[in-house]
Image (cartoon, coloured by chain):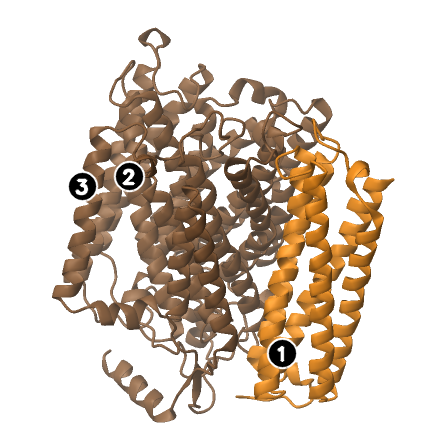
Chain colours: A orange, B brown
Amino acid sequence: MKMDNTMPLEYQTEQSRLNIFGFWVFLGAEIMLFGTLFASFFTLEGRTGSGPTGAEIFEITPVLVETFLLLTSSFTIGLGVHAMRIANKKAMIAFFSITLILGLGFLGFEIFEFIHYVHEGAGLQASAFTSILLTTLGTHGAHVTFGLFWGLFIILQVKKRGLTPETANKSFIFSLYWHFLDVVWIFIFSFIYLKGMM
Amino acid sequence: MDFFDRFAIPHPSPVIYASMVAIGLTVIAIVAGLTYFKKWGYLWREWITTVDHKRIGIMYLLSALLMLFRGGVDALMMRAQTAVPENTLLDAQHYNEIFTTHGVVMIIFMAMAFIIALMNFVVPLQIGARDVAFPRLNNLSFWLYFMGAMLFNLSFVIGGSPSAGWTSYFPLAGNEFSESVGTNYYMLAIQISGIGTLMTGINFIATILKMRAPGMKLMKMPMFTWSALITNLIIVFAFPVLTVALAMGTMDRLFGSNFFTTTDGGMDMLWANLFWVWGHPEVYILILPAFGIYSEIIPTFARRNLYGYKSMVASMVLISLLSFFVWVHHFFTMGQGALVNSIFSISTMAIAVPTGIKIFNWLFTLWKGKIKFTVPMLYSLGFLPIFTIGGVTGVMLGMSAADYQYHNTMFLVAHFHLVIIPGVVFAMIAGLTYWWPKMFGFMLNERIGKWTFWFIAGGTCLAFFPMFISGLDGQARRMYTYSEATGFGIWNMLSFIGALGLAAGFVLLVYNIYYSTRYASRDIGDDPWDARSLEWATHNPVPEYNFAITPQVNSSEAFWDSKKNGHTLFKGDYKEIHMPNNSGVPFIMSIIFFVLGFALVFSMWIVAIVSLIGIFACLAHRSFEKDHGHHISVEEIEKTEAEMRGAK
């Protein structure tokens, strides 16, 4: 394998660079996916039928906690990647673990929020608005859930195999994914919750 | 027995029972044949688990041909039913099912597979790469596509086919009006195959942008590679829209959500919009690679270099951008108002400009060329006039005011078949014939090929020109019959005869493959067409590693330069080559996807959950797996190269 030692560990092999580039393209597709969900959300937002409106069911406290947890996790995974670049395996695993715990906390609050919605009569079937609301939030939540497992696998691999060009590459790509979910959440927070509560 | 009732066909007919028997017998014959000839191991090692882009391309190709016949039978049945007024060959429900499956099979499972087949085979060779960027993902893409296609075709014999049209508009496609599981099949089969297509898109963007041979700048790429790049960009930006739309449709049907319903705020037009936001770019996903193929074939057989390389690229980029801004023209009559319709009218007609530029570029390439009338060239020359007729009638349809007259008539059917058939089908057969020697090491028979061309080209014209007339006269599409007093009978009979001609053409195509496999000469050299781009610089058939030495490129026709101007393509000595390993996991994962889809179609939740866990297990396996590929040593390369040269 050809190695380019002038680059960070995760970029050193040809395949690593391809993986990172390919993942960026994948994120482009993900932007379209969430973009479509947002466009549909804006279309169906006011079509509440016999179900509740956003202003009636949204509560600021759990949403703020979720936002805080997820934004912090984006910061800690950044620290994790920094630790990886200075070859501090222990710190990296610690920061990645903190990230996943914060993600788990986010997911817990989101599940709590969903149960709350169903109790308020805002289940998937209530109206077009609740259908798209739960689908958009659920798609993001499913991504976070997937990320938790993925992140866990990566931590296990780093722990066992150490920081190699391969594990570093995987970790870096995972961090891109995690940051992306954070960006999506910022849009959800601004254009679904805040706009809905106004 | 309630549990089993749902698997029954809601509208059984002798044709369906006969197909069940035929499918059963075919499966038994294949299994028995493989066992008898002891080919299971070979099939598994060399094909099912392969990560070689060339073999994956060939598998796509075979699947596409299979689907061509599946969709073709639907087409013949439709034409037969409408050939005479008040025909009773098929009932209304059965007719609805076959025009739905004809559309889906031809677009999603035939045309898409065909273009991906040729992209897979040709693009890495044209850019001088050893494989695609993510070879294993490529294998997964194929199997997801294949399992999606199989799931869709299963609907014919288990549970009933979808019958809401290939556009599957809501509320017709909702539970209220489509009670059978047919539309569930539609949603899930296309979803599974669509995931595969999206991954192909990502794979080829990375391949083309990052793996080109040294010296091949973007503006020195062969035109087919350019068209593949643009196509894959459209795939990556259009398919997620379909993913979301299909997921919403699935949820409406399975979980009672209210996206596209007519109650509780649901909005049926949202489906139409989302579908066509994907659907119109999809048209260009199909046509751009076809343009790329013509741009390879015309210069080769006109013996001139391609006229207007830069404008060819620019017009493709422009088409790809415009393709995202025209979707409303599919439903001008569905209540947007004059302003919106006018905007989309103008953007639609604007697409004719870059397309026209391409047509003129091909004409100028032909101008004063020493044209050789080979089979691929015949298709290219047939494409130019027929496609132009299809195209200008499209501009007519694009005028929203006039569209109220044409909408949903046979005029529209004539238009889109006359762009898709010369555009995509001609190009695919031309490309198939052109690259066949690269794939298999022998050429298809030219004489049979020319007969095939005349049957297909003549059949196309005879089948679809009459529809312009009956359509302008008011014959609606998707009507299973009509009265004698309408006077549509004669036009539909002509169409039927044309369809038979097309069918004869496709049968000839298969006969040609059989005939050439048996009798064609294997001694054809590496470059039988005297062609211009890099794929012809390696051996026939292509060795596993494509090029023993990575080629050096200096222009968009590097191989031509090496033949005529003394450019050295291969500099240096053999070096050890790194290749990816085969893997069975993508195949297993795709089978689990198939089971998941089937379980969801019939709302079998436990099976669905178990399958989901299975899919995650495959992903986890991939995450932990250590797979560093293997190396081909210099001795092995020397041996292979010596053998290849000796064979000539």
Q: Residue at the location (39% across, 74% down)?
A: B537
Q: Chain of mark 3?
A: B
- The residue carrying mark 2 is B157
Q: Residues within 10 Å of mark 1 (few under 14, many from 20)?
A: many
Q: What numbered label is drawn on residue B10?
A: none
Q: Establish if B446 lies above or below B442.
A: above
Q: Chain of mark 1?
A: A
- The residue carrying mark 3 is B21
Q: Residues within 10 Å of mark 2 (few under 14, many from 20)?
A: some
Residue B338: quadrant of the picture? top right
- Left or right: B250, with A189 as reference point: left
- The residue carrying mark 1 is A155
Q: Residue at the location (44% across, 57% down)?
A: B610
Q: Residues within 10 Å of mark 3 (few under 14, many from 20)?
A: few
Residue B121: quadrant of the picture? bottom left
Could you tell me which secondary element the residue under label 1 belongs to?
Answer: helix
Q: Do we see residue B373 in this rendering?
A: no
* Identity of the residue furthest to the top in this view: B485
Please state which amino acid type lies under the numbered disc 2: Val
